[in-house]
Image: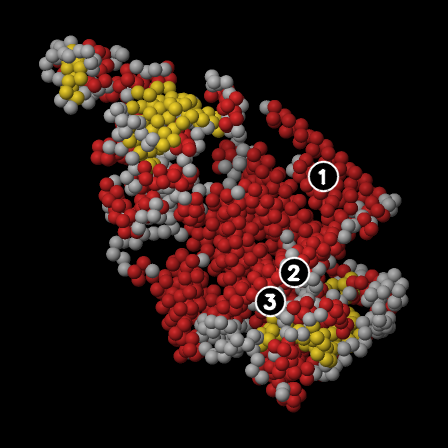
Amino acid sequence: MVALSKKTAEAITCNRAAMLLLAVAVILTTLQYAAVLPAWLHRIPDAMVPPFAAWLDVVFNFVKDDLGLLKFTRFFTEGLENVLDTTGNIFFGKYRWPHLGPMPWTAVAGVAAVIGYSLGGWRLALLGGGTFVWTALIGQWNIAMETMSVLVVAAPLAFVIGLSFGIAAWKYAWVNKAIRPVLSVLQTLPFFTYLLPAVIFFKVGPTAGAMATIVYAIPPMILMTTLGLQKVPLEVIEAGKMAGCTRFQMLRHVYIPSARGDILVGVNQVIMLCLAMVVLTAFIGMPGLGAKLLAMMGSFKLGRSLEIGITIVLLAVTLDRMSKAWAVKQPVHFDKGTSWFCRHKTLVSALCVIVGFTLLSKVVPIAGTIERGQDFSQGKELDNFIKWLLAVDGVQSVTYGIRYVLNVWVLNPFRDFMLSIPTPAMIMMVVAFAVWLGGRRQGIIAAIFFGLIALSGWWDRSIITLYSVLAAVSIAMLLGIPLGIWASQSDKWSRRILIACDTAQTFPSFIYLIPAIMLFGITATAVVGSILIFAMVPLTRYTIEGLRTVPPEMTEAADMAGATRMQKLVNVQLPLALPTMAVGFNQAIMFAFFMVIIAAFIGTQDLGQELQRTLAGTDLGKNFVLGICVSLMALTFDVVIMKWATDKKHALGLA
Amino acid sequence: MSSERPVISCKNIWKVFGDDPEGYLAKMPPDMSFDEMSEDGYIAGVKDVSLDVNKGEMLVIMGLSGSGKSTLVRCFSRLHDITSGTIEVAGQDIMSLAEKDLIELRRSKMGMVFQSFGLLPHRSVLENIAFPLEMRGQDKHTRRERALEVIKLVGLEGREDFFPRELSGGQQQRVGIARSLAIEPDIWFLDEPFSALDPLIRKEMQDEFLRLQQLLKKTIVFITHDFDEALRLADRIAIMKEGAIEQCDTPDKIVLKPATEYVRKFTEDVDKARVVRAGGLAEADQTGTGDPVDASQTVRKMARMLVDDTRDFIPVSRAGKPIGALSRAEALDVLLGDQ
Amino acid sequence: MKTMTTALTAGVLALAPLSAFADSHADSSDPIVIPIHNWSSQIVMSNVVGQILETQGAIVEYVTTDSQAVYESVRLGDVAMELEVWEGAFGASFRAAMEKGGIVDVGDHNAVTREDWWYPMWTKDACPGLPSWEALNDCAALFATPETGDKGRYLDGPVDWLKHGQERVESLDMDFVVVNAGSAAALWAELGAAEAEKKPIVVFNWTPNFAEAVWPGEFVEFPTWEDGCDTDPSVGPNPDALFDCGNPATGYLKKAAWDGMEDKWPAAFATLEAVSFTNPQIAEMAKLVDIDELEPKEAAEVWLEANPGVWETWVK
């Protein structure tokens, strides 16, 4: 009781503080519009901006050259390069040791089908085999294998590193404490910030691509490993100890195998993130599907972009389904007297497939490689079709109309308004929002984070980034939440939409640019469009989940109270679903921050553009400052919204 | 039996949970109650327990959940480090053992069965059972041979290659039992081994367990929250409440002479005639006349004889040797529930 | 992953006996790595030179890199050479790399380069005062798009070309918004779209390039380039700003190489020294990809086949 009233009192003071901050912010903004606000209150004068980038450069250079980090990473690069050359040789016949490759496409597709079958029966076999057959027939075999050859190196390395850190974080509390904030930052850091250091330390090309991919994919592996190990049942641990296990035996025979499920979920995430990133590393010259897609999109060849997009999506879905099937697959015993061949039928059939198709490809060359001209690509025709479609007057006037209305009436005024708000007023608004939703601690965090952004010297661009995110997420909410509410009303549609969302979430983020560019060309509208599609997925998904997981006795109670559907929705379901929906909103914001940076390549004016510009040099310091700005904004939202959702869940007794 | 040194001997052991248990315990006044400690943020898992377990004996520790019985048994195997007191297991002070020696002790002398089985999900029945042997580095062949032996003992033949999730609860616990027996332990800990099973299976497993015990004659510490189970199996029962032992005695004594009100409440609804045996009623200074009854006979089994007989004292013998005589009137009191 | 690895290992083992068919060139000579960027003439030229080197027995690999960052890579030997060093675009990066050392100047192509704001001729109909930049600025509204509001849109090259379009707009106080294209190809796509409706458009362009043959047009005349315009604010019409002049109208086009190349691949280096392309040849190469839609590798083959007289003399 005492604690409760204390909490209420704190909430009241928080609300009052939020109101006060907001009032001051409004006054400052009004003064700005009345043109009586001194310039130094509108924006921090340049002279007061500390040269963070230069300081960081000094540190980076010291570490890089004086401490010899560069020498070390370059040494490491050589090893990595040898491994990548080997897989490169096997997958697409790069001219390197062991001079075996390339594997015939039929063999790869066959092996994928065999693995698919052993993991999940005929459906997965069809998906696995089908994906590679499509890739070969559509004439993208080589670029797809370039991508795969990096993926098969990056994913296992990310797995091993993530697992080791995960174990360390689980074992030693101080490692955990040290690693958590780093992981939070890493997970919100824009991917461009991974790319430049990768190039500087690991050489242009596949090595840098692989390294950026690895670093990008590690965080979820660490988190899942720690989580899995913490979840091992106490009795299993005690059984291990009573069996007289040494510490290492405990880890090797008890903890890790028992946490297998969670660790494999981590593996699934590692694979998916690796695929997403390996596509994005096209920006630093990583060849493969991503590079081709980037080039095709850039030149507005949408048919071909679409074909590559389909390949990437198929690969993503295949890898996702297979690794998930692996995660839930349980060992099954064989009857006594089962022969060695039957017990190892996956291995045996995979071997047969490889040998068989390799021999076949010696006789029938087309089973080995499909040459240009032999493929079934309809890219050019599709290009022309889409071009024609978009040029149709009706279509064009609609897309132009949307562009016009959206930009002239909504986006540009909103942006200009955001930019007109004086820096201190903006910070106060954000802090007010944080205090109101989260509490004092969240308010302080928001103040520090946005204060740092103001001091970074990139305030305007940060605000433009924030504006794109907010604008796109708002529109996404207008579309995604009603869709979710509608779908949640029927079992059939909830299931269908949820499957669609799940599948869409496995797509590498790059893919979302394709439909946006198709409709709106290479314009700022396309940027908003792509963020919108990307952010709608979690919004819809969590709305459905939130509404569907409202405890049935509550909806039954509403029914018995004689509530109409609408009354039930507004008074019972939505309030209870709100915390879950907030998690979806948070994810949408995180996705949007990620996407807005990718969209830089369409031509934005925000932090993303500056970040992409840093790729053209060696400005590690600037690159880092820009990346941190994005990260700080994303983290502010994350901290506040998640706090609110947790509090609300507790208050509603749902946690 | 009791002439030999006890296998487990603990003196004044405490296990306190909290931020600084040692410091707290050192400063704590000696007669602090469980509730008073809780108010300070400390939980007395085990509260000043002194207890001996003799060789070949089955000691059942009985208590409701949270009474500290599982904590106590984990102190015996040093899965928990005790806060103060001493525990000797097989003559060694286990708190002073180095990690290496502790592991050696567990590998060679202790077996433990868990409530929710604690099986390793990724290992087959055979591999689970051979696990302790593998840990101590036995070669594949011998450990397989030994595992098959134990599998036979617990009646799981033909399921060697099954995985835990492919078995029923009862079968899984047989695996747990087999695993704990694989190293031929001297001391066998069973932590509510049958609680997770449904009542029919539980009865069957208890019979099975008694059969095994007849065969193996291990020193056993058995934990349960089920008083009937305790009465059924125990040589001696220790009843725990809030970390402390309320009474530790043979089932007859507990039923006939509960030491505290708490214990009495447990015994209230028990059909004493089924529990109390001739041996428990026998008075050593009496001899009686006529044919003796065997000490292991329950009063219920002797019911007809007690009613029909006319003797005041009936001689009682154990393994053919007279140990005294029981008062028929007293036995009838037990039978009729007048006591 | 275990199954995957097993399958892979199995694959390797299964292929081992068949590997006899593979090329027996297992020599230890390292491949010559040639960087390629995001405009066609450079990609085709790199492939052309790569294929010439292959006729000499070299092993060549291509790696896509950023066109500014590449000079750092050349310096470190990560890539062996750079075939198109445009004075206007990359002069600064190249000079900076020269100062740090590790890179050598391998001579000029027989070509004159210029890169700047550019418009196709139909634009002039709507804005007759062109090519003067002041006239362009007066017509700014003609170039407006929904995204840029009432200001004109100038479609600049990809961000990483560092064209300083934004700086120029600011220093000359122009009513334009700079929008960066994703790649060179995006420029041509926009030009093509504008052509259909004869919409006025101003984009970044350069010569030698195929575009001048497809869409006749002119460069916008900005205040003439003076040395120091990019380093000294006082140079140029705006005394307080950098980049307030046009780019040099007659720039060089150089070849550069890693300074270890000569020792490591002397023959290839000699060939590289001899290589020299002219404006029309470079435009032709770009056209093969941008208009004829050939893959760069095929474009190079086509070009080599069509012009044996040009390149055979370079090989010794």
Residue beneath the point at 40% across and 52% down: A329
Foreground: A621 or A145?
A: A621
How crowded pointer 3 is (Cα within 10 Å; few <14, some 14-19, many 20+) is rated as: many
Report whether A553 appears left or right of A649.
left
Q: Position of residue B288 (x, y in %)?
A: 14, 11
Q: Picture quarter containing residue B339?
A: top left
Do the residues under discs 2 and 1 have CB atoms within 8 angstroms?
no
Residue beneath the point at 74% across and 45% down: A451
Vertical comparison of B197 with A64: above or below:
above
* Residue matched to label 2: A196
The span from disc 2 to disc 1 (Cα, nearest Å) is 36 Å
Q: Amino acid at mark 3?
A: Gly
Q: Chain of mark 1?
A: A
* Residue matched to label 1: A432
Q: Amino acid at mark 1?
A: Ala
Report whether A372 appears left or right of C188.
left
